[in-house]
Image (cartoon, coloured by chain):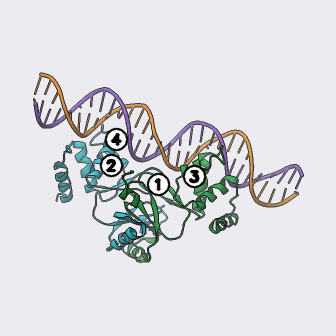
Chain colours: A cyan, B green, C purple, D orange
Amino acid sequence: MENTELREALQSLKSTKVRMTPQRHAILEFLFNCESHPTADDIYKSLEDQFPNMSVATVYNNLRVFKEAGLVRELTYGDSSSRFDSNTSDHYHVICDECGKIVDFHYPGLDEVETLAEHVAGFKVRNHRMEVYGTCPDCRSGQQH
Amino acid sequence: MENTELREALQSLKSTKVRMTPQRHAILEFLFNCESHPTADDIYKSLEDQFPNMSVATVYNNLRVFKEAGLVRELTYGDSSSRFDSNTSDHYHVICDECGKIVDFHYPGLDEVETLAEHVAGFKVRNHRMEVYGTCPDCRSGQQH
DNA sequence: TTATTAAATAATAATGTTTATAATCAGTAT
DNA sequence: ATACTGATTATAAACATTATTATTTAATAA
């Protein structure tokens, strides 16, 4: 079965003036088919067999294009590189402090947080972000750091 | 009036094997007296009159020491540098997308988020982080980007 | 007070991610 | 065919942060 969200993303790009190139398609496809939250370098390395001559700048450029189109979200943590998430629906992340694993989870109704922040700080609030940190099951049981 | 939290922080460092140096004291004092959330470079620049020969590595080293001692918290956002917060009590931040201003706010009772994440993901949860993004009053009214 | 020693500093180089630049290339329209 | 627009590649540059190493210093005890 094909990936519906990928098709919608391609459609959405076609409706703007964004050209579809093989590299662009491959990056988008990789993002929408992968379960994890890859870095730009992960994507670059995963596609080097398919595109031996692709530049890392192409990956960054296209991730910016996708971000601006609202198709992917950039996740920034303290250490090193950004990660990219093709799931742009509202959800949060649980992150393992030891191995960096990221697990999605849903939690309803934090709209009131935004409302409170609006009142307290006088901001026009657009969105929010939340992460929970801890130790994942694998790192808890094994010592396989 | 002196800063109580600074005194406690100094005391807490003294109780470990961390030596007190003039640079270290100045960095800590700056952090605890400043209302904002400075970057390492902000700190470096603010102290260059006092310590013309201080190395930027010294700032980073000491921020790490303070972080490990639980005296400051590192805040990482997408763009550029980390920011450091001497307020280690539980609170959240409202961040202006346009000018980067950061305002603290409190919101009670997100413990259940941690509990849910524990169950959903099987993690041993340690803490969480939340930020609200929007436009601050200044950027809303004026066009002074 | 002086000596000792482990730790901190300064200066610098190195690392790693991301962005900027310039030349080339591909597709589309004229 | 030619010109135009935007994408890609290759490379250099920018930037924050960390590592390295020689030198200096704070804490401790003789």
Q: Is residue A57 visible?
A: yes
Closer to the N terminus: mark 2 or mark 1? Answer: 2
Tag in front: 2 or 4 = 4
Tag in front: 2 or 3 = 3
Q: Which residue is disc 2 drawn over? A: A43
Tag in front: 1 or 3 = 3
Which subunit holds the residue at mark 2? A
Residue type at tag 3: Ile
Question: Label 4 vs label 3: CA separation?
Answer: 33 Å
Q: Which residue is pictured at 16% across the width and 50% down the height?
A: A15
Quadrant of residue B94 in the image? bottom left
Residue A57: assigned label: 4
Question: Label 2 vs label 4: CA separation?
Answer: 12 Å
- Kindly indicate whether the residues beneath marks 2 and 4 are on one polypeptide chain: yes
Residue type at tag 1: Asp
Q: Which residue is pictured at 20% across the width and 50% down the height?
A: A13
Q: Which residue is disc 3 drawn over? A: B43
Q: Which residue is pictured at 41% across the width and 54% down the height?
A: B99
Viewer-side residue, A136 vs B132: B132
Give the percent coordinates (x, y) of residue A73.
Answer: 32, 56
Which subunit holds the residue at mark 1? A
Question: Label 1 vs label 4: CA separation?
Answer: 21 Å
Residue A79: assigned label: 1
Which subunit holds the residue at mark 3? B
Q: Secondary structure at mark 3?
A: helix
Q: Which residue is pictured at 37% across the width and 61% down the height?
A: B133
Mark 4: give few (<14), some (14-19) or many (20+) Cα within 10 Å: few
Give the percent coordinates (x, y) of residue A27.
Answer: 27, 48
Q: Are circles 2 and 3 on residues that touch, CB within 8 Å?
A: no
